[in-house]
Amino acid sequence: MKVVSPDFSANSFVSPSGKKYIIYPTLSTARFEVFERMQIEMEYSVSISAFKKEVSETYDLLNKAKPADAAVKLYNLANGVSRIENSQPHPLLLICTLFICEESEDQSTWNEAEAAEKVSDWASVDIAFFLASARRLFSRFTSAFNTDSLNTLEGTEEGESE
């Protein structure tokens, strides 16, 4: 199947299956909570629960004076690959499912199974489109990916180039 390459500035696109998706510039409050969790999953390549478990175990190892074991845990955490090994969607694509929606989609809820279906439907869509779309969303909500406040420079030339 041919790769679909929507224009980066498009506010909608049609997937190869014929579904029309709207690219919304913002998130509902409910979906913003999911967005915060996924930021961590994207940054550390691990789920929130796995991240918490690994950090707790590392803390315990340090308290038991086992720095080498703690270092191995931290290394594994920093270089997590379980998502890739398990063929799970990349957190960036899951983030895109928060704001790229079908017209009739209820944006006050979100679940991973429906998101995975969306990502599957997007299989023939150029990944660069999703990277650009996610970047626009991140630039609106974060400044250098380290805050949860709305970026007030959004829409300005300076804000768009960050």
Image (cartoon, rainbow, N blue to C red):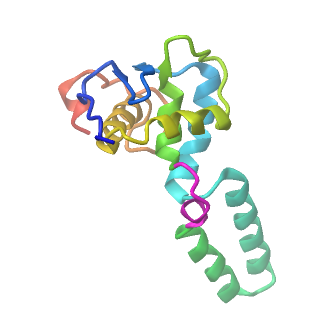
Instruction: State how many labels appear.
Output: 0
- In the image shown, does 36 or 10 lie closer to the viewer? 10
**At 50% from the left edge and 50% from the top edge, which residue is drawn?**
90
Residue segment shown in magenta: 81-89
- In the image shown, does 10 or 37 lie closer to the viewer? 10
Q: Residue reaching furthest left?
A: 157
In which quadrant of the rendered image does the N terminus lie?
Answer: top left
On the question of residue 55 being in view, the answer is yes
Q: Is residue 86 inside the magenta stretch? A: yes
Q: Residue reaching furthest top?
A: 104
Image spot of residue 67 (x, y percent)? 68, 85
Image spot of residue 151 (x, y percent)? 39, 28
Q: Residue reaching furthest front?
A: 1
Image spot of residue 79 (x, y percent)? 52, 70
Q: Is residue 109 inside the magenta stretch? A: no
Q: Is residue 12 placed above or below 116 in the rendered structure? A: above
Q: Is residue 101 placed above or below 69 in the rendered structure? A: above
**At 76% from the left edge and 86% from the top edge, which residue is drawn?**
65
- In the image shown, does 156 or 94 lie closer to the viewer? 94
Task: Say whether residue 22 is left or right of residue 40.
Answer: left
On the question of residue 148 being in view, the answer is no
Task: Say whether residue 59 is left or right of residue 84.
Answer: right
Task: Say whether residue 69 is left or right of residue 91.
Answer: right
Task: Say whether residue 42 is left or right of residue 9.
Answer: right
**At 67% from the left edge and 37% from the top edge, which residue is drawn?**
113
In which quadrant of the rendered image does the C terminus lie?
Answer: top left
Image spot of residue 136 (x, y percent)? 34, 31
The image quadrant of residue 61 is bottom right
